[in-house]
Image (tube, helix red, strand yellow):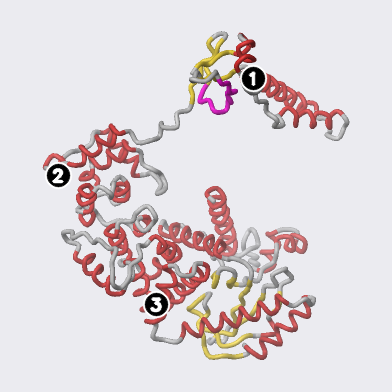
Amino acid sequence: MYIFNVDDDCTLKLAHSDKPPLTSTRTTQMDDLEKIIKKHETGDIPSIEWLDNLTFRKIEKINQNQVQMHVISSSLSIWYNLISPLYSQTLNTHHLRSQIPTGKFITMKVYDPEQYRYDPIELKYRKLERSHKDGPFDREIKPTAKIRDELNKILNYSSVQELSQYEKNLVWKFRYFLINNKKGLNKFLKSINFNDEAESREALSLLYKWVEIDIEDSLELLGPNFKNITVRTYAVERLKKAHNNELELYLLQLVQALAYEPMTTKNTSEYSIVELDGSNTASASGSSLLTNSLTPLAQFLVERALVNDRLGSFLYWYLITEAKEKPGSIYKTILDYYMKNVTHNSLQREIELVGVLVQLCTKIKAMRDTTPKKIEALRNLLESKLKSFPSTRLPLDPDVEVCGTIPSESFVFKSSLSPLKITFKTTDGGKYPLMFKVGDDLRQDQLVIQIILLMNKLLLNENVDLKLTPYKILATGPAEGAIQFVPNSTLASVLTEYHGIAAFLQHHHPDPHNELGVSDWVMDNFVKSCAGYCVITYILVSCW
């Protein structure tokens, strides 16, 4: 292959080129800028002297760069010396890795598509390094200060950070040094090739010898990157020590993790439990799972749900939402098994209540009348169907039991989906308003609220109470769900009526002895909650 500067030999180019040089038909940046300059000259864009000077200098630089790139791209061709006559193809400059001017000609480095493939020498080195059995030297080896800093850097990587081959080898080499660091287990398992039987067996022998990891780290072991059943069983064993309140915070992610579990049948098993020292619980659990045809995680979630009604309610709605969207998936199998083992009928009453709400919302949504007519129809339907009913747990908040509705305090929002605001009567004489809608997927909103609750828990663990009280939300299907209704005043209405937030707070919570005229606890709640939501929403927007 030869690279010629075409400007030096136009005859060669014309004699051996089958096709004329390719030219770009795309609109350049200068073409767009020229249109804007014309608008500026005609007065469509107002003139600002200091800004015009900066802008025109920038446009001049862009023009010079495009002229240079045009000269380079139009003067380079690649010539292939084949058996047949020479063929010419214009070289597209954006495929080049770098350009180094060397006088009249240009030296170029061309992208190599094989540069990211595994090096066979590295693979051989890895196999040789990890093929030997454990010895006293492996257990006693200690890192130097420099290597210890590298290991700490690796341990501080986020869960989505990929490890390089060098970092994997480093973690493997000092695995016994890291065995007492709970952050080291996940990084160690990431460095293992589980397709290599010898390497996998040696790694799994350290699993139950490692210091106990946190619940948050065990969630990573249930993700798509870890298919080994022994690793997943270990993660479930760690989850069994979690309190129900902690488990509820992560239940949404655990249900999603079920999609990565290996499926089994009653007659055959895909499990390959490795016998480990001190891992009798894993072996016993494995035999139980084979009998019930459920994976370790599924069996654990069902067992917890059967002894805790609140967890059981949330587990049902999370499973049914996924099962409706993915028929024949693992979610349907687990849901059927769970419903067969539920002994009380409180969950069935929840299902019936949501079914009636879906029917009401669908019927009101299909009406072509005005909003007042829809509100009247809703109240008539509530009078006839949900005026009173046996005590039922509210799916949105299973700790609350409702026994009827208040039609006069229920209405229809003016929206294309016509969501309903329904006020329920609780068994303790209170009220619980909520919004129910059909035609909208609430799972993303549900995830955001769950992340806010999780962040609030982490802050409380550090003794930082930011007075966060996010509303509740529950998706009862792929396109339906309930949202806790929180009556409030919009900021615009507050500013219109009170001409400031301070005056609003002084009106509702006055304290003449305070300098600001507002109760201390009210101002404390307002400032802390504003700060908390500002930080959390900033993080969510940055990471979404």
Q: CA distance from mark 3 to mark 2?
A: 45 Å
Say if the magenta span includes residue 89: yes
Q: CA distance from mark 1 to mark 3?
A: 69 Å
Tell me the residue that label 1 is attached to.
Answer: 74
Q: Which label sits in the foreground, 1 or 2?
A: 1
Q: Residue furthest front?
A: 84
Tell me the residue that label 2 is attached to.
Answer: 133
The residue positioned 45% from the left and 28% from the top of the image is 112
Tell me the residue that label 3 is attached to.
Answer: 338
Q: Residues within 10 Å of mark 1 (few under 14, many from 20)?
A: some
Check disc 3 and give the amino acid type. Answer: Tyr
- Front residue of 153/111: it is 111
Say if the magenta span includes residue 327: no
The stretch of residues the image draws in magenta is 87-98
How far across and how far down the image is residue 183, in percent? 31, 49
Question: Judging from the image, what secondary structure is the residue with disc 3 in?
Answer: helix
Q: Quadrant of residue 9?
A: top right
Question: Judging from the image, what secondary structure is the residue with disc 2 in?
Answer: loop
Q: Earlier in the sequence, mark 1 or mark 3?
A: 1
Placement of 30 over or under 455, stated as above or below: above
Q: Quadrant of residue 88?
A: top right
Q: Are marks 1 and 3 in contact (CB under 8 Å)?
A: no
The residue positioned 62% from the left and 67% from the top of the image is 440
Q: Earlier in the sequence, mark 3 or mark 2?
A: 2
Q: Which mark is residue 216?
A: none
The residue positioned 58% from the left and 23% from the top of the image is 89
Question: Judging from the image, what secondary structure is the residue with disc 1 in?
Answer: helix
Q: Earlier in the sequence, mark 1 or mark 2?
A: 1
Check disc 2 and give the amino acid type. Answer: Lys
Q: Which label sits in the foreground, 1 or 3?
A: 1
How far across and how far down the image is residue 474, in percent? 54, 70
